Image (cartoon, rainbow, N blue to C red):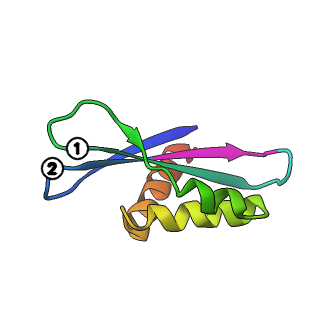
Amino acid sequence: MMYEKVINRENGTQYKIRVNAYLDSFRHDTMEYRIDLYYKHKGKRMWHRVECDNYEYIKLPSMEEKRKFEYNNYLSYVTEEEIYNSKLELWELLKP
């Protein structure tokens, strides 16, 4: 399941946090989250994905380290609390 939350900044820039929840994946019996971050400048219609420094990202040896690097890059645009609240809102939608 996917959930998107749009966050507005004072300068007019918008950030969209997209949270994907993967339930009962083949690796674990728990829920896993995948976070993607997009931005849109004031007065524009097109969303752009926030990308990492490709050279540094490619040099990392494992996927876990790559995910941490990507997450730390996202924290330069949105706060950890905003990401956490997006996950909670998705969790509220999943509750029976």
Determine whether, in the image, residue 31 is placed left or right of residue 11: right
| Front residue (pair 57, 45) | 57
- Is 23 or 81 nearer to us in this picture? 81
Circles 2 and 1: CB atoms closer than 8 Å: yes
Q: Position of residue 61 (x, y in %)?
A: 78, 64
Q: State which region is magenta.
A: 18-25
Q: Quadrant of residue 80?
A: bottom left
Q: Is residue 41 above or below residue 62?
A: above
Residue hosting label 1 = 41
Residue that mark 2 sits on: 12
Magenta part, dominant SS: strand
Q: Position of residue 71 (x, y in %)?
A: 54, 63
Q: Nearer the viewer, residue 32 or 44?
A: 44
Q: Is 17 left or right of 41, judged from the image as shown? A: right
Question: Considering the image in quadrants, where does the N terminus appear?
Answer: top right
Nearest to the eye among marks 2 and 1: give it. Answer: 1
Most extreme residue toward the top, as rendered?
A: 45
Residue in the image at 71% along x and 62% along y: 59
Q: Amino acid at mark 1?
A: His
Give x and y (percent) for residue 5.
37, 46
